[in-house]
């Protein structure tokens, strides 16, 4: 049990004057006084309120929640970061639920699962549906039992937040945090939390951001399992080939000859098989790479330990 970890509460904000004060107060009341607000150039009183409550406030150098988080991860050096929205949707009182598995040493990254306990009206119907579809899609292609990969309330150890590689600047950040964690072999765990209706205006654009997140989920599959990434594309080609093939055969018997479609059928099936073969090779390469990376990380740790002596 690690009881003396230092914890930094990280809050990305963009015009959250209605929620930010209460969020910071909640953490201070719980004894978490190291609070870092990374602000996206709010035009309201967000920064002023945060500073008056004793938080450290930094204005991000770029735009978007993702960029803010990337920048903050470089600036912070605590043992653990707790990431939370500044809109009052998550409860500071529940922070120990997220920290407990890290203290016990059974997880490196803990995610608050909102779907377990959301209050009425906390999700718009569109956001709830979108969340369910995206999580289902994630489970289907990754084969990992997670239920709220887009949650904004998380705790991450330094090993995680200093080693994962984030690239996207917008609302894809939660997807990246999740996938990078599992791709780098860290342990991720979900705990049930409460989710409330937000204060102030949303910054999320459900349709645009939903599509961006879906494409990030699929795109990042290549990092987690290049094999699977190609298998699904391959399968899609083969399926398309078969459907066309059924049509061609059906028509064949009706005497009409469809040379072009017959060629396309074969092409799709053969391409599909080839893409799957590519997947097998990629899987092999990435597995050997991961092994080398893990050994390097262990070596680096050993060197640091030796230096410390
Ligand atoms: N620094 C920074 N923070 C941002 C930016 N965009 C959003 N945020 C903050 O990121 C957090 C999450 O944004 P939200 O608008 O709450 O998005 P959401 O939680 O997915 O959706 P709702 O809560 O349903 O509106 C909030 O604290 C925002 O203020 C940005 O460009 N820069
Ligand atoms: Mg929010």
Image: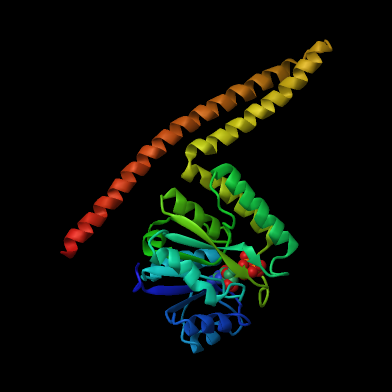
Establish if 111 lies above or below 202.
above
Question: In the rendered image, which quarter is residue 152 located in?
Answer: bottom right
Establish if 268 lies above or below 251.
below
Can you see residue 184?
yes
Question: In the rendered image, which quarter is residue 32 located in?
Answer: bottom left
Q: Residue furthest bottom?
A: 52
Quarter of the image that includes the C terminus: bottom left
Residue 205 rendering spot, x and y as whole percentages: 68, 62
Establish if 277 lies above or below 60.
above
Residue 88 rendering spot, x and y as whole percentages: 61, 76
Give the left or right position of residue 187, taking residue 115 as reference.
Answer: left
Residue 277 rendering spot, x and y as whole percentages: 50, 27
Give the left or right position of residue 102, taking residue 66 as reference.
Answer: left
Task: Give the residue drawn at x 71%, y 17%.
Answer: 262
Q: Residue furthest right?
A: 254
Task: Give the residue drawn at x 73%, y 15%.
Answer: 259
Question: In the rendered image, which quarter is residue 79 located in?
Answer: bottom left
Give the left or right position of residue 55, taking residue 270 as reference.
Answer: left
Residue 71 rendering spot, x and y as whole percentages: 45, 67
- The foreground one among 24 and 98 is 98
- The foreground one among 224 and 115 is 115
Q: Which quadrant contains ligand 1?
A: bottom right
């Amino acid at each position: 049990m690690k009881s003396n970890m230092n914890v930094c509460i990280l809050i990305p904000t963009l015009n959250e004057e209605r929620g930010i004060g209460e969020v910071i107060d909640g953490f201070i009341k719980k004894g978490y006084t190291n609070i870092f607000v990374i602000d996206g150039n709010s035009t309201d009183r967000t920064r002023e309120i945060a500073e008056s409550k004793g938080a450290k406030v930094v204005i991000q150098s770029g735009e978007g929640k993702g960029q803010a988080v990337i920048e903050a991860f470089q600036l912070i050096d605590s043992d653990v970061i707790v990431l939370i929205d500044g809109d009052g949707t998550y409860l500071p009182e529940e922070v120990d639920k997220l920290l407990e598995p890290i203290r016990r040493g059974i997880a490196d990254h803990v995610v608050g699962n909102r779907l377990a306990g959301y209050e009425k009206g906390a999700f718009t119907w569109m956001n709830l549906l979108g969340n369910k579809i995206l999580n289902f899609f994630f489970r289907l292609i990754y084969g990992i039992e997670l239920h709220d990969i887009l949650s904004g309330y998380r705790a991450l150890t330094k090993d995680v937040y200093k080693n994962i590689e984030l690239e996207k600047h917008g609302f894809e950040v939660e997807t990246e945090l999740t996938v990078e964690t599992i791709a780098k072999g860290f342990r991720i765990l979900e705990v049930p939390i409460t989710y409330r209706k937000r204060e102030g205006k949303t910054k999320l654009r459900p349709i645009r951001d939903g599509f961006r997140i879906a494409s990030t989920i699929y795109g990042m599959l290549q990092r987690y399992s290049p094999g699977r990434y190609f298998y699904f594309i391959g399968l899609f080609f083969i399926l398309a080939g078969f459907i066309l093939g059924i049509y061609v055969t059906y028509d064949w018997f009706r005497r009409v000859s469809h040379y072009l479609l017959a060629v396309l059928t074969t092409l799709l099936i053969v391409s599909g098989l080839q893409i799957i073969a590519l997947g097998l090779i990629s899987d092999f390469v990435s597995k050997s790479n991961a092994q080398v990376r893990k050994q390097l990380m262990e070596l680096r740790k050993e060197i640091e330990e030796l230096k410390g002596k």
